[in-house]
Image (tube, rainbow, N blue to C red):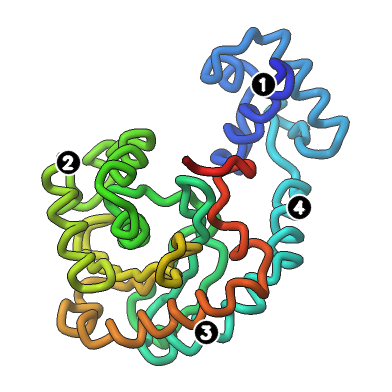
Amino acid sequence: MSGSLEKSLAVLEYLSARPDGAPLAAIADDLGQIRSGCHRTLQELVKYGYVRALPLKGDYALTTKLASLGLSFLSKSGVVDIAQPIIERLARSTEELVRLAIVDGERLTLVAKAQGAKSGLLYDPDMGIELRLSCSAAGHAWLMTLNEEDALEAVARQGFGQPSNFGPKAPTTIKALLTMLQQSRKRGYSMLRDVYAAGMSAMAAPVQISGEKARGVVIVAGPSQRLTEERMLAFGGLLREAALELAQARHASPLLKSAHLGTWGNVLK
């Protein structure tokens, strides 16, 4: 990757986590870039419409162009058209939030959702985020489809993260993680409480045809006080049926069809 392209992508990723914008000095210092060079990169991104300079503070922020490209890609991929009726049906049956995450190499990214809860406490995290493999129900549902070596390599590359950022029951050792993955394999889906976040429960099943790699993950999530262990066990059959239905429809979506490819189209080994 060329130096200028690498710096531009680093700036875009940095600003994507700061919707209110950030000053030049903070961007350059946090990314380890020389301020004059970072300023030139920002000016190029402004020129092509990806970044705007905020008039009052002099900070820089993303425009909606990058988000628009992503939404256009998802729309043309067909994945939302295929998935939405299926996850909406599951959301109505469980009366909880249902989401679909796509496998992109060793990343899981949320691309579609349906809210089934009609009242009370709603759980609805950000869409488009990259999920932590070691402590998310989606991560466990995907990892359980891999052999132990590949699963641990994927987790090692992403890391366990800071324990303070996740729930009190989040695994912090390989032994603890492997135990949880073994339980998920026996069950056919992952089922976590107070792991990704305190007070949150989630369950997930891989979108996978036998003999093929998983293309995505279907997740049901909600507050632990409502989405109890008993309810999750009762929803297990519905969850697996929805995941299988999505897997069988994989060839209708270029995104689902190519999910066995790695990030940026590199084939996983």
Q: Which residue is mark 1?
A: 7
Q: Residue at x 21, y 57 (%)?
A: 181
Disc assigned to residue 174: 2
Q: CA distance from mark 2 to mark 1?
A: 34 Å
Q: Which of the marked residues, 1 or 3, is nearer the chain's N terminus?
A: 1
Tell me the CA gap for discs 2 and 3.
34 Å
For residue 168, say whether it is visible: no
The image position of residue 50, as x and y in percent, is: 78, 38
> Mark 2 or mark 3: which comes first in sequence?
3
Q: Nearer the viewer, residue 246 or 124?
A: 246
Q: Is 64 on the left or on the right of 250, as rendered?
A: right
Q: CA distance from mark 3 to mark 4?
A: 25 Å
Q: Which residue is mark 4?
A: 69
Q: Is residue 236 visible?
A: yes
Q: Earlier in the sequence, mark 1 or mark 4?
A: 1
Residue visible at 47% across and 79% down?
Answer: 115
As measured in the structure, the alpha-carbon distance from the residue carrying label 1 to the one carrying label 4 is: 20 Å
Report helix, strand or loop for mark 1: helix
Q: Secondary structure at mark 4?
A: helix
Q: Is residue 155 above or below residue 197?
A: above
For label 3, the SS is: helix
- Residue 57 vertical position relative to residue 127 in the rendered view, above or below: above
Which is nearer the N-term, disc 4 or disc 2? 4
Sequence-wise first label, 3 or 4:
4
- Distance from label 1 to label 3 (Cα)? 40 Å
* Type of amino acid at the residue the image marks with label 2: Ile
Q: Quadrant of the N terminus?
A: top right
- On residue 86, which mark appears? 3
Nearer mark to the viewer, of 3 and 4: 3
| Viewer-side residue, 203 vs 153 | 153
